[in-house]
Image: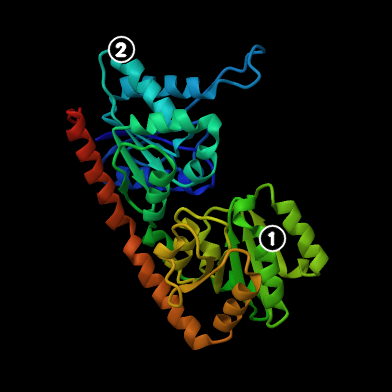
Amino acid sequence: MRIGIVCYPTYGGSGVVATELGKALAEKGHEVHFIAYRTPARLDTLVENVFYHEVTFADYPLFERAPYETALSSTIVDVARFAHLDLLHVHYAIPHAATAFMAQQVLKAQGLFLPYITTLHGTDITLVGRDATYASVMTFSINQSNGVTAVSQWLRQETLNNFAITRSIEVIPNFVDLRRFRKSPKEHFRRAIAPRGEKILLHTSNFRKVKRTGDVVEIFYRISKQMPARLLLVGDGPERQQAEQRCRELGISDQVVFLGKLDPVEDVLAISDLFLLPSETESFGLAALEAMACHVPVIATKVGGLPEIVLDGQTGYLCAVGDIGDMAAKALSLLGDESRLKQFRAQAAAQAERYDMHLIVPRYEAYYMTVLQQAGVSER
């Protein structure tokens, strides 16, 4: 099958999932064409059956902002025609569902039909999509999709509750490549971070307000007063400067390491004892899943799709949003009990196995075939 994948090329969850899915499909023999304005963060283009097409758009003085959506639709049309795509899979509804619909109409006028699937990832529904500026077009283009998927049961229901969606939504959860994340800790790396045997806590995100990075710092501060510990922060974004300033105010800057955008993240996960994810909302929680795949328990908030993957009291703990005291207390109780920490590590890894790439990717393949059959087209 020849599949086009449109995604944001960032470190956010939707871009990561789209890239990992494309690579997994290529490994199974499908021809995969990525379409984005920059090479996706986890894309190695030197992979058999993987192709990358960059969206270029002219910046004329007439335009206050470059017309990205039009350029993307045109690129989709070109790739579909010359690579003979069977199917287009767009990740994150805004603006990708609308650009896919536009490309589909252009191709239809040329005598070609390209079915497209829209995967909903979270903030395209829970945050941006609710803005009246986008809602009507987004709802229309999702309904025009030949298939729609969501990454969690919670996100599916949230979409149906807040938008007039007339199509069925298939839930296909995010996944993890256990071959990549089941790595032995690099002991020299751990000694460099924690030379006196300190516990290592980790947080990865894009440092947006919804991730509540400030809560991570406050939780760690309470932990550090009770036991020797280090905090690793992976990622970058608008809240980083504020987090750095708060570390200085609390006098913990020498215990906190800002690593910036880091790939592969599994090397850091492998040496960590606990993962902190105090988000205001998470449609799925891919970062938590990747942590558990590395045998790292998770302290997270009881929001969105997180309860579907983090088993409270087994693979970590779920707390109320903003309850820094409870999260710190739960973390201390776990880090202070080596036997229970070892048990939680094993249970976290076992839970991650349910989301193994080799179990989830075939569900996408089966869905692709269903969409093609329903659209009345066959593979070229």
Mark seen at residue 214: 1
Left or right, 11 with respect to 313, comes to right
| Label 1 packing within 10 angstroms: few (<14), some (14-19), many (20+) | some
Find residue 23 and report its image quarter: top left
Which quarter shows the N terminus? top left
Where 266 falls versus 298 (above or below)?
Answer: above
Give the x, y percent position of residue 91.
42, 39
- Asked if residue 147 is positioned above or below residue 253 in the image, the reply reads above
Number of marks drawn: 2
Q: Give the amino acid type for the residue marked by disc 2 in the picture.
A: Ala
The answer to whether 66 appears left or right of 356 in the picture is right
Q: Quadrant of the C terminus?
A: top left
Q: How is the image coloured?
A: rainbow
Q: Can residue 323 be spotted in the picture?
A: yes
Q: Is residue 356 above or below residue 82?
A: below
Left or right of 259 on screen, residue 133: left
Residue 109, numbered label: 2
* Amino acid found under the numbered disc labelled 1: Gly
| Residue drawn at x 29%, y 42% as measured from the top left | 168
- What residue is rendered at 55% in x and 20% in y? 67
Q: At 28% from the left edge and 29% from the top edge, which residue is drawn? A: 115
197 in relation to 311, above or below: below
Q: Secondary structure at mark 1?
A: helix
Instruction: Residue 349: name its quadrant.
Output: bottom left
Mark 1 and mark 2: Cα distance apart in space: 52 Å
Of residues 135 and 331, the one drawn nearer to the viewer in this rendering: 135
User: Looking at this view, is 142 or 377 the one in front?
Assistant: 142
